Image: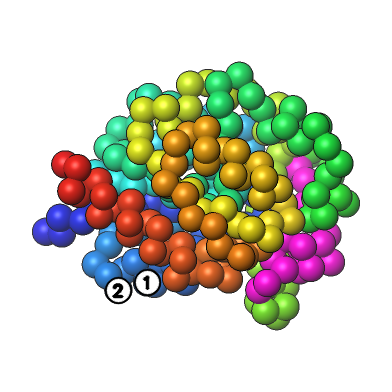
């Protein structure tokens, strides 16, 4: 039986579990048990319920990594995160108690990737192809970026008004990868999130989907987290 912690990967809006593929392959090659489920991108409560469902299947301690809106999901585990021993944020929202993504985004003009959202009749937001390829996945090969666009998981606009309770990072060690060229979440906002949570932080000159364009950097941070908690325990 492996003594390494499990790794659960949480995708964000306009991505899906396959966005972690390059990271998964590397972690598996290093002996980690990895799960990267699909999330409904509906209400925060429903997304957290999916994460708890996956955590219940893990045998032993688990590192949870979240990208973008996935950071909102992992933080919303709160103080009751069964089996979770560390959190890794990849260009992700890291809100504090009482904050919402909608309130945060209202503080300034929309970033290039989300400036032209398409809202469908069910209230889900989709990214147009040009914005997806040129801003959301700007440093990904365009052929691959268009395939990612085709499988994008839209985000319910209702999720923007969900208010964070006591975040899990208040009680768990955290790591943060700042995407220095992010066109979805401002890099300065990412630096603020990381600083507030006291996260061990690295900055990479990548756009928003770092796990696709810079998987080695993402794997290095996740494995650093995993090895740190192993030593601590």
Left/right of residue 38 with respect to residue 133 in the rendered view: left
Mark sitting on residue 164: none
Compared with 36, 199 (above or below) is above
Residue name at image x 38 percent, y 56 percent: 222
Q: Nearer the viewer, residue 154 or 67?
A: 67
Query: 138 and 117: which one is in front?
Result: 138
Q: CA distance from mark 1 to mark 2?
A: 5 Å
Is residue 167 or residue 189 the one in the foreground?
A: 189
Q: Is residue 46 above or below residue 218?
A: above
Residue 26: which numbered mark, if any? 1
- Which contiguous range is marked in magenta? 124-140
Would you say the residues marked 1 and 2 are in contact, meaning their CB atoms lie under 8 Å apart? yes
Q: Nearer the viewer, residue 19 or 106?
A: 106
Q: Is 68 positioned to the left or the right of 168 in the image?
A: right
Q: Quadrant of the C terminus?
A: top left
Please name the residue that numbered disc 2 is placed on.
Answer: 29
Tell me the SS state at disc 2: helix
């Amino acid at each position: 039986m492996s003594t390494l912690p499990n790794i659960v990967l949480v995708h964000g809006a306009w991505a899906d579990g396959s966005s972690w593929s390059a990271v998964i392959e590397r972690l598996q090659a290093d002996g980690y048990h990895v799960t990267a489920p699909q999330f409904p991108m509906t209400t925060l409560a429903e997304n957290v319920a999916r994460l708890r469902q996956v955590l219940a299947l893990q045998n032993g301690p688990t590192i949870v990594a979240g990208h973008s809106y996935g950071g909102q999901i992992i933080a919303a585990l709160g103080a009751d995160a069964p089996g979770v021993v560390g959190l890794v944020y990849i260009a992700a929202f890291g809100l504090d108690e009482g904050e919402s993504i909608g309130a945060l985004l209202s503080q300034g003009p929309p970033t290039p990737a989300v400036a032209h959202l398409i809202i469908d009749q069910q209230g889900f937001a989709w990214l147009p192809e040009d914005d997806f390829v040129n801003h959301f996945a700007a440093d990904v090969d365009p052929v691959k970026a268009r395939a990612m666009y085709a499988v994008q998981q839209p985000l319910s606009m209702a999720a923007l008004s969900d208010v964070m309770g006591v975040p899990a990072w208040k009680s768990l060690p955290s790591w943060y990868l700042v995407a220095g060229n992010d066109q979805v979440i401002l890099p300065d906002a990412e630096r603020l999130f990381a600083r507030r949570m006291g996260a061990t932080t690295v900055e990479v000159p990548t756009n928003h989907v770092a796990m696709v364009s810079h998987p080695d950097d993402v794997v290095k941070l996740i494995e650093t987290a995993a090895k740190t908690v192993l030593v601590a325990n």
